Every structure is written in C-alpha cells, then in structure tokens.
Image: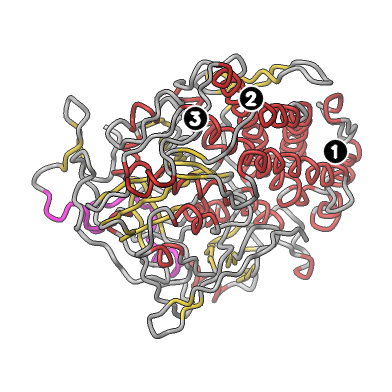
Amino acid sequence: MCFKTLPVEFDERGNATLRGGIPNPYDVTVAKPDVALTEDQRRERIERLVAANGHIKDLNMDPVTRIAGALAVHVTADTDKQAYLDAHAQATLFRGYEVILMGRDPRDAIFVSSRACGVCGGVHAHAAAYAIESAMGICPPPMGTVVRNMTEAAEMGYDNPLHLYLLAGPDYSEVILKASNPELWPKAESWRCPNADVHGYTTMADLAAALNPLTGQLYREGLEFTRLSREMVVLLTGKYPHPENVVPGGVSTTLTLQTLNEFHSRLGKIFDYAQRMLAVWDDIPAFFYEADERYQFVGYRPTNHIDPGYWDDPYAYDATYENCNAWGEKRWSTPGVVIGGELLTTRLTDINIGWEEFVEHSYYEESATTRYETDMLGNPISPYHPWNKRTLPKPGARDWKDKYTWACTPRWDRQVVEAGCYSRLLVTAMAQKMPESQFMSATGSSMRFVIPKGESGEREVEWHAPVRWNAFERNRGRAYHYLFSQLVALESLLEAYKLMKQGETRVAALNPKELERAIPMDERRSVGWWGAGRGWLTHHLVMDKGKITNYQICTPSTINASPRDPWGQPGPYEEAVMNTPIIEDVSDPARFTSIDMLRTIRSFDPCMPCTTHAYTGDGEVVRDVNTCSCGAD
C-alpha cells in the first residue's frame, strides 16, 4: 500500500481501485495530508511578529542570479533568532509550451518542447519522443535506444559541471566567503583538505580560490569539460542544445564506427576529471560541517524524493504503458518514490496515478475535469491529473495569500516531493534493481562505482545516502551523479560496439513516410517518462484525429519551485529556505547578504522558463520566443 492520503487501494494482483464509500474522493477537503500549521495560521503569526519586532525583515531576492531563467524569492527573516520565518518562490515568466502545441502534429512536440530550455533541450526532445511513440505504438530498435542513452548521458556530462562550477560553485569561492562569511576565511586557510592528493588543493582556501568566477582553475576547467560533453552530444544529434535527430521510434543518426570511436575518445578523458570532482565536493561539506554544525541544516528538508527513472534497457523497453512497470524497473536509474526515507514504490503506474497538479497559488484558471477517470489499465486518476488538466493562463497581481507565481503545484499522493539528479542515486540505491554492471552497483543505502583506469588509475568510490538532505548534500549528490551518468555512457557505448559488430545498426523503427502513415486518427493518451539534469521530467500527451489535444510538461523545477498547495504546504524551495539558519554575521544590516538562503536555492539547480510568451489580456497568447543566457555573476 503506497498511498497514504489518496483513497486508493490495491487488490492481490496489484490493480488499483478507489476505496468505496467516499463521496468526492479527490476533493481537496476530503483527501488531506497531515499539516501542522495552515497557511493562514502561518501568515497571521508572521504578521504579528513583524508588527511587534524591528528585527523581523521582509526581503526580496529578485532576480535570483546564477540560475537558468527568472526566479524571485521573498523571505521574512528574523535576524535576532537568525531564522527564516517564511518564504515564497516566484517563477516570474509564463512558459506556455502546452498552449503552443495545441492542435499541432504530435511530431512537432519534439522540436517545440526542445526549445523549453537553452541548457537541456535534448531531454525535452526525448521525453516528447517517448510520449509520442507510446501513443503511436512504435518501439525503437535496440541501437536506437542505445544511442538515446549515450546522448542523454553525455548531456548530463554538460549539465552537472555547469551547475557545480559555474552556477553554484561560486557560492563557496574565495570572493564570496570573504564577503559573506569573513569569519570562515582564517579557518579555510588552515584547514587541510582530506582529498588534496586527488584534486590538488592543499587547504580549503586554495580550493575556494579555484572556485572564483572567471579566474578560478575549477571554474575554467568546468568550461572546458562542458564543451567536451557538448561535442559528444553533437556527434550523435547534429547540434546542441536542440537536437535534430530525435524521432518517434528511435533516432535519425547515421551511425558509423568512426562516430563511436570519436565519442569514446572524448569519454575517456572524463573519468580522471570525475575523480577530481568527487574529491572537491566531498571536501567542501566536510569543511563547512566542521566549521559550524549549523551548516548541516542549510537547505534541509525531509527525505521525500521522486524520479521516473532514466536510460532504458534496449531489450526491455517496448514503449507500451501496459508494460511500463517491467521496462521501467530495468532502467539504469530506477523509478521510485521515497517518502520519509522509505521507498514506497518503483512502479511507473503508481507514480502516474498518484500525480496531481494544483493551481490555487498560480496564475492559472482551475481546469480540473473528470474527463478521464482512469488510466489505460483501469487504475483511478485524479481530476487534477495532467491528462485532466489544461493550461489556462490568468495573470494578476502578486498576492502571497492568493496567487503569486507562474509555477503550478505538483504533488504525489498530496505529499511534497523533491526532484533532483541526486534523487536518482537515492532511489536506485534503495531499490537495488539496476542492471548488472562491472562499474556500478546498488547496496540499499549507497551506490558503489568503479572509475575506469585513466592517467590516475582505476579507483573505487561510494556515494552514501545522507542522513540529512541539505544544500551541501545536493551538490555532493550531483557530483556523484556526474560519474553515474558517464558510466552509463560507457556501458551504452560498449553495447553500441557490440550491436555494430553483430550488424544491428538500425536506429529507427520507421522511415519518414512510414511514420507519417502510422499517425493514429483515434484518441490516444500517453506519457513520456524521462529525466533532466535536475531530475524528474514528464510529458503527458492526449491526441485525437492525428493532432495534439492536450499536452502537459512537468519539469523538475516545476516541482521544486512550486508554491503552496491547497493545504498550505510550501514547495521544496520554500520549505528548504524556512529550515535554513542564518549563519552569517547580521550585526550590520547593511552587510546582510542572505548567502545561505541563496546557497539553498542554488543547490536545487533551478532551471526556470527560458521562453517568454506575452499574455495580451484579451485571451490570446502571442507566440514570441526569447532566449536567455545563464551566466554567472
């Protein structure tokens, strides 16, 4: 029984049904999660404190810099008790890809949704392809799936270092430490790094200097290796970040032995770099925890994680919803939901039927319907499920008690869950269902990796599920995910060599003319379960008469940046900020930087909208596309 809040139960064969005798079982006043304090009670308490105390301050971080896209965070800080009393995360731009896709040929979703991000466009293209081929009933040949895995593992090779060294890394650099935490600098100068023999920096001060924006060695090295991974992606996709080779039923890549060899030559350079990356992000938490134990609570929130899995088994994946639990559990990264540190399920159908999206505090009109009461297997789904949802923008004034963001509020079983590439490590470690590998294994509480021999030789490393999830553990987890993804790239490359040797070089199920004829004219529903550099990614599709009638994208940052839900539960960003102590010196208000709040937010690697759609006020959306750059301060 994986559901605690939703009135869903399972028979002995694992089929889900609604519990009997409950009128309006999905009503928000009926199926309610346990909440200690309602939003109204929280706001009343804060308003009383603000009125009575001069040390209670409202702060607006708008925009939050060194992230992708547009995000603002409003906090209420108690500088006397050194705590954040309240927080609201605001996505300040309307996305609207779902609106653009209405009425289009389903194949357009691959190329339109790819433009959702200038950092990780490939993941959207692939998620769309998975949704379309599931709806159409076509499955890639093994080499097509292997090439997808190689592409997406290489894309993680770009995404993870980008965050660790260009976006979040400067938060731990010499220039930031001296400005925001000057009391730490003498400790940094004397603290000797336990992994100095691996990464080459003797003291924490040396390591922090290497993280300095633009000039630091680690910063510049991060640029070099993100380029290397982009080259690996381009070898397979033709261009980056918006691939041109992704099609329903596989890829359109012309694959040769030379292509594989060029991919291999670049991949071989990564593993020494991965060793150094792990050493850096093991030492940074160690220093901060030792300097002040309160850093263990910077960005803390409960161990509630969700992930749909990533990187398919080329011989198990068949693109059907009917068999998704079987092929999903054979992914390199296992699907799953962890609530309160307990793994509740690894079944994709359970993940799907427990998924809801609310808009009480978002700039959208309510669109919940009961058009679809079950999934294609007869399992019950909510009126708030993506298949029953429409994107109906309704901009308005910002009101923390009402609507204040363009992000909606995804929940699983009405619980607040977090998405991250590190969530893949946690679920995969706990599930112990990953394919057999000479380089990777799951123990139940950790992931063990064998880093292949390079200039520094073969090395065994282990990621342990943290006791306390916080900003530092997210960054550490992202570093280990970098290694995880590159080992998946290696396993997939070896499989590609094997298939090529056997003459199994076909990469697509259908040619373009066959694909055109295969578009169904009856109504179909599907979901593309995939992943991004920040974790969870799903594309829910409804099509009829050969055209898209509903399309819903849920990104990891939609989950993490979500506002309050109908029961007043804050989203992951908001909750993590409210759990963060103010550690910096606040004796001089003019020097208050909120650095630990910013470290918290950036630890999630926010990727906010990279496309702006102007709402005219008369019910029409203007389809103007603007790109953003994601630079560092």
Which secondary structure lies at badge 2?
helix
Examine the structure image and report whether residue 35 is included in the region drawn in magenta.
Answer: yes
| Res 207 quadrant in image | top right
- Label ID, residue 474: none
Nearer-N-terminus badge (2/1) = 1
**Mark 2 crowd level (few <14, some 14–19, many ≥20, 10 Å Cα):** many
Examine the structure image and report whether residue 151 is included in the region drawn in magenta.
Answer: no
Closer to the eye: label 2 or 1: 2
Tell me the residue that label 2 is attached to. Answer: 490
In the image, what residue type sits under mark 1? Met
Closer to the eye: label 1 or 3: 3
Residue closer to the observer: 26 or 121: 121
In the image, what residue type sits under mark 3? Arg
Q: Which residues are magenta?
A: 22-44
In the image, what residue type sits under mark 2? Leu
Tell me the residue that label 1 is attached to. Answer: 204
Residue 195: x and y, percent?
Answer: 81, 26
Q: Is residue 504 placed above or below 140 in the rendered structure?
A: above
Q: Residue furthest front?
A: 513
Q: Is residue 226 placed above or below 403 in the rendered structure?
A: above
| Res 618 quadrant in image | bottom left
Which secondary structure lies at badge 3?
loop
Q: CA distance from mark 2 to mark 1?
A: 33 Å
Q: Residue at x 18, y 52 (%)?
A: 25
Residue 351: x and y, percent?
Answer: 35, 40
Nearer-N-terminus badge (1/3) = 1
- Label ID, residue 506: 3
Q: CA distance from mark 2 to mark 3?
A: 20 Å
Q: Main secondary structure of the magenta part?
A: loop
Left or right side of 516 for 18: left
